[in-house]
Image (tube, rainbow, N blue to C red):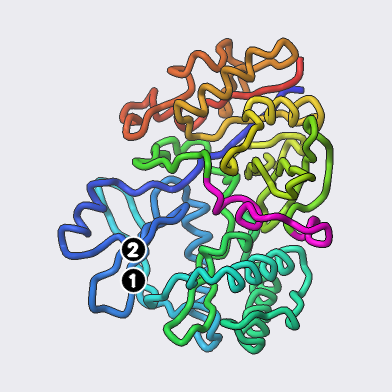
């Protein structure tokens, strides 16, 4: 099966020189998300969020939820937002807005576990069991948070992206412990105007994919039988002695390799489907638990042969990611080829030809390299 069109532009990017300009004026980098960077000046009670350049539709979606928060400032579970404006920098326009200074969640295990469960329930259209609220949270606060999520759903705020409720980094707290939803939407699969190739940049910083228990369901801890569907979704197959589970949550598609003996997830991926090919899987992230015995290329091959998927590389390709695709290509029953997402042309190169599809960070300076970064992907199918 061939892919007819793919488009996964990845994260929005901020020019490193613009970041340096803020820090030179006394701002500190307080956080970095998929699409924006947070700056804070010590002694102030607000932060400045600068949205990266790269996708006009996604910038517009962020404006939508900022305006939604502004229109609902009486709801304590939405952040207080202030002024917003456009910044002109080196011929690019960046959207920026102010927000009240909030705190990260405290990290209490019982609190984090319950919030992970509760947001999973809300993401699947269910209400969490308030009888299970642990110390450190209040029933009233959880009722308010649930109502706020329902309000977002009913408003149509998610648009074409859906909500990213599974990421607890999108929940913060005020000093009094009140829970606040920030940055609620998922940013996969933009439909960019094909003529705007100048809008695409390579990230200056690429976060590594690898061993990161914080990205594993239930933080890599054992999952009891009655919690399987909540944390893992639906069992769809096997990989040797392991179970394979699939989960849709907040617009994100995940596959989990689950060890039924230890009852833990050993390998997990997240990504999306291209909307014109229901059997495609754009892999945005791959994370392994410490000691994971399953090789990434084995996992990819299983998704292709057993799940009938066409795999598509992410816009970012690290050296480690390149090696996974090269090992995948070595299987006699797998075909890997290049694909031009703009023209629909199948290209005669494979995973070993990294110069044909992978542009290093900060290297997308000329028209050719920007075109590669914007349009060229690897695709893997069964022979």
Q: Decide whether the magenta segment is chiefly helix, strand or loop.
A: helix
Q: Quadrant of residue 149?
A: bottom right
> Above or below — where is 373 with respect to 43?
above
Q: Is residue 259 left or right of residue 347?
A: right
Q: Nearer the viewer, residue 315 or 196?
A: 315
Of badges 1 and 2, nearer the viewer stands: 2
> Above or below — where is 130 with respect to 86?
below
Q: What SS does tag 1 mark?
A: strand
Q: Residue at x 31, y 80 (%)?
A: 45
Q: Nearer the viewer, residue 123 or 195?
A: 123
Task: Find disc 1 in the rendering and name its residue.
Answer: 47
* Residues shaded magenta: 212-230
Q: Earlier in the sequence, mark 1 or mark 2?
A: 2
Image coordinates of residue 141 in percent, x first then y, are: 61, 85
Image coordinates of residue 70 in percent, x first then y, are: 48, 79
Q: Residue furthest front?
A: 261
Task: Find disc 2 in the rendering and name its residue.
Answer: 30
Image coordinates of residue 69 in percent, x first then y, are: 51, 76
């Amino acid at each position: 099966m061939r892919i007819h069109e793919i488009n996964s532009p990845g994260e929005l990017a901020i020019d490193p020189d613009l970041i340096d300009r803020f820090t030179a004026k006394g701002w500190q980098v307080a956080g970095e998300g998929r699409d924006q960077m947070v700056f804070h000046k010590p002694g102030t009670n607000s932060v400045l969020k600068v949205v990266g350049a790269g996708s006009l539709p996604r910038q517009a979606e962020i404006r939508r939820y900022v305006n939604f928060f502004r229109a609902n400032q009486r709801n304590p579970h939405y952040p207080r937002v202030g002024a917003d404006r456009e910044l002109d920098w080196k011929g690019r326009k960046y959207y920026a807005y102010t927000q009240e200074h909030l705190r990260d969640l405290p990290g209490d295990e019982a609190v984090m576990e319950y919030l992970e469960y509760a947001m999973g329930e809300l993401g699947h259209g269910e209400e969490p069991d308030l009888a299970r609220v642990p110390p450190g949270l209040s029933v009233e606060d959880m009722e308010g948070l649930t109502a706020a999520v329902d309000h977002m759903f009913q408003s149509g705020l998610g648009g074409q992206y859906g909500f990213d409720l599974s990421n607890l980094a999108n929940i913060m707290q005020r000093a009094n412990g009140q829970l606040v939803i920030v940055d609620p939407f998922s940013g996969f699969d933009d439909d960019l105007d094909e003529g705007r190739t100048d809008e695409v940049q390579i990230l200056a910083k690429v976060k590594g994919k690898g061993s990161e228990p914080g990205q594993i369901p239930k933080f890599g801890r054992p999952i009891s039988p009655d919690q399987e569907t909540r944390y893992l979704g639906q069992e769809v197959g096997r990989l040797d002695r392991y179970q394979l589970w699939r989960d849709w949550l907040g617009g994100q598609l995940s596959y989990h390799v689950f060890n039924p003996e230890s009852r833990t997830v050993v390998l997990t991926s997240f990504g999306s489907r291209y909307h014109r090919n229901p059997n495609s899987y754009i892999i945005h992230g791959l994370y392994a638990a410490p000691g994971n015995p399953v090789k990434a290329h084995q996992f990819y091959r299983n998704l292709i042969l057993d799940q009938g998927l066409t795999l598509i590389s992410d816009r970012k390709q690290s050296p480690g990611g390149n090696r996974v695709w090269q090992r995948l290509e070595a299987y006699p029953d797998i075909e890997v080829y290049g694909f031009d997402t703009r023209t629909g042309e199948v290209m005669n190169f494979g995973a070993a030809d990294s110069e044909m599809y992978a542009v290093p960070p900060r290297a997308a300076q000329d028209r050719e390299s920007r075109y590669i970064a914007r349009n060229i992907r690897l695709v893997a199918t069964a022979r």
